[in-house]
Image (spheres, coloured by chain):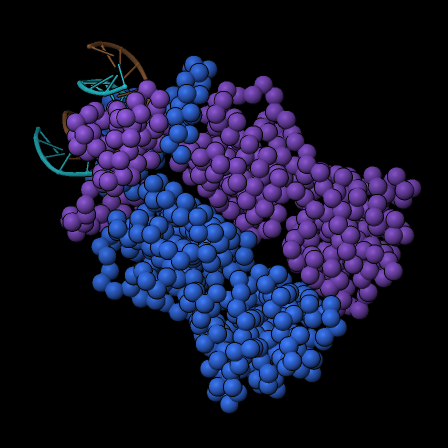
Chain colours: A purple, B blue, C brown, D cyan
DNA sequence: TTGTAAGCGTTATCAT
DNA sequence: ATGATAACGCTTACAA
């Protein structure tokens, strides 16, 4: 990164000559000169500082508009050490859940005068770490993130905690770090999904679970196990598989389950992606869904509704989670002091029953 | 925005006292002092300026690391008037096509030492305009964008062109503005889709088209018409509908088509969303796809593959388009001079044949 | 190869 | 209610 900077500066050398013609930006000093007042007055007026009289304020704003003044926020950020920007790191922006969260974050951030800078880690630790360093270097006022599946070291997040830059986790949270955390009720989601399958008369309910280093997947599984036990069903290790929940992982998992001596009559999948690949696998192998195997997914991705059979799933309140995360972050940014204790806020999940799980 | 800034500064007043304990950031001056050299040498060394000897460079970097030095890029950006950041505005990050483009942009941007700031307009003109102002105020080095459906005034983009901030359009481009444009071959896409339907023996091919103020939808339709004419089929205005291509629009459009005196035996939809809602409508009304009505969509959204019947569609090279857009933008940023003429780069589209269009 | 010093545009302190 | 001035941390001519 550093060496690149140097190369660029070399290029700039010739560029500068060419750009001579560019009109320079109007600054508060230009306005001050034009109006025969001081730059500080201009600055105050433009920021609606109440010390400035209404009359001069109007005069200044009018002049600013006429002169095509554009505040240089980089200069202001530099001076104030604030950027009015919050950084967001998500594994993948292309997941409906994550983009819902982002929309929620944006809604409250914009309302409060913050810009939002979004980056995706691609579920890759290296990338996440790079992004964290970049956000830090760019002095974002706070960060909202859901960590990558591949992340197990949290060194890169110390950047923020050490300098008291507020951090809010959502969904994939880190227990070891003290911060506000917004999670969906994954336990209840797993519980509801499994209980629903039990209510449909299923007895041999398998689970395709996610990486157990992530709390959300632990919780979904815990809900599953609790529901089984509550119904007097014995959880069976052979029926619980773990992987990274990609399309391919799902296919492998369902294939393993269906080729075992004892086949499940239902599968609870820890996300919709593996629910989908399970359904496709079963269809290709002429195993009827839901008649022979019932399926429930997790997250309510848009495709879950339109696939045939449509996928029963657990809905997470992504938009609301995003709003909440942004609210908590901005409150911390504005208060500046570190809160005494950090809550973990759990938001309700909801079962959506569709075709893939309903015995006729 | 301005008045908000003032309120925040008020809050900071008390905050500052509380934060007294914060250790101040290490600066290049601290390093200089510690090593008894000048700050400029430190700056040069850290930027790998070849003027600095290997020995002192190593010494400085070591000290910087030990002292926990973190470059203040806001200060550097302020000084150099560059932010090494490119802004991206897309209608919706949650569309597979757009997130593919974003991934392509990120790939080359990161490689070249640029950060990427992503925003979504939600297909809303006001939001797009706000974002443009925010990106401008934050002095991004260049912007890549696909305009919102609701955008018809381009005042907000003059911000960039007037100050020679390079702009690259992709997909939804603006004819009136002189800039590099990266588009998929929409004409050919429309042509291929329609020709495919003709080859399947369809005679009454309708089209659900997009807003005609957007060139891409004009082109998709032009391809459709050309294919029809080439086959000696007469384009029929009653068979061509226009709307905003949402799920709901698609349902309304297909319903109108199917309730008319003369029903189509095939529909080319200008996006996959309307292809999907058409299929759902047809299924609900017991009209067989593809037997009675064949469907082709556009964009190859992930759901197109997994829906039943799977949707034949046109694939756009989103990732490649993103890479190309970023390359062109960064070239302009580095060269700084305005190119003499701007190319419009058309990237190939491809027909993907699936179940929704193949007569058995 | 290194140092000196000016300056980027803004905000904030202190004075009036 | 307004002004003068310093300062933020960095880069970069120019000097040595």
Query: Residue A277 lies in what quarter of the image?
Result: bottom right
Query: For the view shown, which residue lies furthest in the right direction?
Result: A232
Position of B99 relative to B216 (above/below) = above
Viewer-closest of B115 and B253: B253
Residue B338 pos. (x, y %):
23, 57
Q: Quadrant of the C terminus of chain A?
A: bottom right
Viewer-closest of A213 and B237: B237
Looking at the image, can residue B245 be seen?
A: yes
Residue A182 pos. (x, y %):
63, 34
Question: Which residue is rendered at x = 28% and y = 26% of the image?
Answer: A55
Position of A321 relative to A197 (above/below) = above
Q: Is residue A232 left or right of residue B231?
A: right
Position of B149 relative to A239 (above/below) = below
Looking at the image, can residue B54 be seen?
A: no
Residue A337 pos. (x, y %):
50, 20
Q: Quadrant of the N terminus of chain A?
A: top left
Task: Count the marks.
Answer: 0
Question: Which residue is rendered at x = 45% and y = 36% of the image?
Answer: A114
Residue A23 pos. (x, y %):
19, 45
Q: Is residue A351 left or right of residue B213?
A: right
Question: Which residue is rendered at x = 53% and y = 62% of the image?
Answer: B244
Viewer-closest of A328 and A17: A328
Query: For the view shown, which residue lies furthest in the bottom direction?
Result: B232
Question: Which residue is rendered at x = 48% and y = 44% of the image?
Answer: A118
Q: Is residue B68 left or right of residue B225?
A: left
């Amino acid at each position: 990164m550093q060496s690149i900077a140097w190369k660029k500066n070399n290029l700039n050398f010739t560029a500068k000559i060419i750009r001579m013609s560019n009109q320079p930006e109007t600054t508060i000093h230009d306005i001050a000169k034009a109006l025969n007042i001081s730059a500080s007055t201009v600055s105050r007026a433009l920021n609606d500082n109440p010390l400035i009289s209404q009359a001069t304020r109007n005069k200044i704003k009018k002049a600013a508009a006429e002169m095509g003044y554009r505040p240089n926020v980089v200069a202001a950020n530099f001076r104030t050490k604030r950027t009015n920007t919050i950084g967001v790191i998500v594994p993948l922006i292309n997941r409906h859940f994550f983009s819902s969260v982002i929309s929620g974050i944006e809604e409250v951030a914009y309302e409060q005068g913050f810009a939002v800078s979004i980056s995706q880690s691609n579920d890759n630790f290296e990338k996440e770490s790079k992004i964290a360093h970049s956000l830090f270097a760019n002095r974002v006022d706070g960060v909202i993130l859901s960590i990558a599946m591949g992340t197990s070291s949290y060194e890169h997040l110390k950047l923020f905690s050490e300098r008291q830059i507020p951090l809010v986790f959502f969904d994939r949270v880190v227990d070891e770090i003290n911060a506000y955390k917004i999670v969906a009720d994954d336990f209840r989601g797993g519980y509801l999904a499994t209980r629903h399958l039990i209510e449909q008369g299923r007895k041999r309910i398998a689970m395709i679970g996610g990486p157990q280093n992530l709390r959300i997947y632990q919780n979904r599984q815990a809900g599953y196990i609790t529901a089984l036990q509550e119904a007097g069903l014995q959880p069976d290790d052979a029926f619980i598989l773990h992987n990274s929940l990609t399309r391919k992982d799902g296919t492998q998992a369902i294939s393993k389950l269906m080729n075992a001596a004892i086949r499940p009559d239902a599968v609870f999948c820890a996300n919709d992606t593996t629910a989908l690949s399970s359904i496709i696998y079963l269809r290709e192998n002429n195993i009827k869904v839901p008649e022979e195997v019932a399926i429930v997914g997790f997250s309510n991705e848009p495709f879950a509704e339109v696939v045939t059979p449509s996928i029963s799933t657990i809905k997470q309140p992504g938009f609301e989670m995003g709003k909440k995360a942004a609210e908590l972050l901005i409150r911390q940014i504005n208060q500046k002091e570190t809160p005494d204790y950090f809550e973990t806020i759990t938001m309700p999940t909801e079962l959506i029953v569709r075709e893939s799980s309903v015995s006729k």
